[in-house]
């Protein structure tokens, strides 16, 4: 019996993705047949240097083939600051209107070559949250709602943030401010209901935590509109739940209300359905008006009257951020936004 020895060649172990060399701008330059400076100009969208369109295309194609992306930290060192705009995620539920505004703002900032990062700081409030934001060294911070104070603004500025912009009912020292006039929303709704002959007016006050910054000014606006008239105002605490709306609807006839400003369209639709289930006719027995002017409100029967909100343009806010980044020593700007216009439909 003859024995034959066979040597099995070793198969090289597959290269782990973690051990592969990271492509560099030099690799892109070699593949595209250009200098590293040209790669930098193209991928950083530098407008000061004119580069032909075919060259730009070759650089982008080479970068895509190699999987190369510019190094954000190195880019920041060259510019003297990052291009990150930090947006703390709202700690409260936001509706479609606000979500649309945020999407437009992110698009506009992206067009100006900023990177928008949403930061979830659950459990952190005010200046404590500002310290967490500062650790990321953003060039700008857009703060929705309330809670940030002058100390938090100063901390962010010391950490390198060239612009701090707040969106809320009050201005904060050291920050640019977009003042949201929620009292005007309530005032517009109440004025409309009173002009339609309604005198016993309820106002929905959401029970969800965090909405007080919006609901209480709206309530105050209704109160101001009805002050000195023969109308009465009844506060209606309401959770955003079908069961809570049904319980309120059961008591409706005892409350004796002939109109309701339901805080926004979503609460208005919730309450309208519960009232109709109780046999309460809208608007004959009770007029209903919401706020936000959502598409779904136009599809209801009866169609929902509402207060249309004119939010700031995402493009205008992006330009404010860019202006503040380029001129960090300029005086802070304050703009009053959130125009309110009643849209009268069938429900009132």
Image (tube, helix red, strand yellow):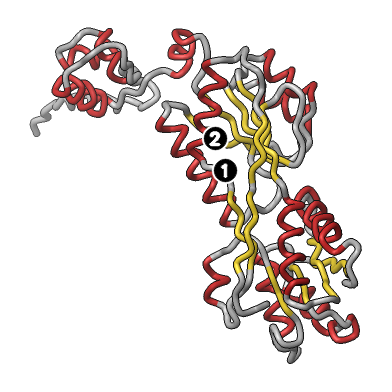
> Which label sits on residue 317?
2
> Which label sits on residue 312?
1
Identify the secondary structure beneath mark 2. helix
- The image quadrant of residue 307 is bottom right
Q: Nearer the viewer, residue 171 or 44?
A: 171
Q: Residue at x 51, y 32 (%)?
A: 318
Residue 190: x and y, percent? 77, 65
Q: Residues within 10 Å of mark 1 (few under 14, many from 20)?
A: some
Report the number of discs: 2
Pointer 2 or 1: first along the chain? 1
Q: Residue at x 59, y 24 (%)?
A: 140
Q: Residues within 10 Å of mark 2 (few under 14, many from 20)?
A: some
Residue 277 visible to an observer of this rendering: no
State if disc 1 and disc 2 touch (CB < 8 Å). Answer: yes
Disc 2 to disc 1, how far (Cα)? 7 Å
Identify the secondary structure beneath mark 1. loop
Q: Residue at x 76, y 89 (%)?
A: 278
């Amino acid at each position: 019996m003859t024995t034959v020895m066979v040597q099995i060649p070793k198969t090289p172990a597959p290269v782990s993705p973690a051990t592969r060399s990271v492509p560099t701008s030099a690799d892109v330059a070699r593949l595209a047949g250009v200098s590293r400076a040209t790669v930098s100009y193209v991928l950083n969208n530098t407008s000061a240097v004119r580069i032909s369109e075919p060259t730009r295309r070759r650089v982008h194609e080479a970068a895509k083939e190699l999987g190369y992306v510019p190094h954000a930290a190195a880019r920041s060192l060259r510019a003297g600051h990052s291009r990150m705009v930090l947006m703390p995620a709202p700690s409260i539920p936001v509706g479609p209107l606000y979500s649309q505004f945020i999407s437009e703002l992110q698009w506009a900032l992206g067009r100006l070559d900023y990177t928008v990062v949403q930061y979830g700081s659950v459990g952190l409030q005010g200046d404590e949250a500002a310290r967490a934001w500062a650790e990321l060294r953003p060039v700008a911070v857009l703060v929705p709602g309330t809670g940030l104070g002058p100390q938090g603004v100063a901390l962010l500025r010391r950490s390198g943030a060239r612009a701090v912009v707040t969106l809320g009912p009050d201005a904060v020292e050291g920050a640019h401010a977009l003042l949201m006039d929620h009292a005007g929303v309530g005032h517009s709704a109440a004025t409309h209901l009173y002009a339609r002959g309604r005198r016993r007016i309820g106002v929905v006050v959401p029970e969800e935590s965090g909405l007080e910054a919006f609901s209480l000014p709206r309530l105050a606006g209704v109160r101001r509109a009805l002050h000195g008239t023969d109308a009465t105002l009844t506060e209606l605490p309401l959770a955003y739940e079908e069961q809570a709306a049904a319980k309120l609807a059961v008591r409706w006839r005892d409350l004796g209300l002939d109109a309701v400003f339901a805080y926004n369209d979503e609460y208005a639709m919730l309450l309208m359905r519960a009232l109709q289930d109780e046999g309460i006719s809208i608007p004959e027995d009770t007029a209903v008006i919401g706020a936000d002017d959502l598409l779904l409100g136009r599809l209801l029967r009866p169609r929902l009257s509402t207060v249309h909100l004119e939010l700031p343009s995402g493009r205008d806010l992006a330009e404010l951020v860019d202006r503040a980044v380029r001129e960090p020593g300029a005086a802070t700007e304050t703009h009053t936004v959130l125009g309110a216009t009643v849209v009268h439909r069938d429900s009132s």
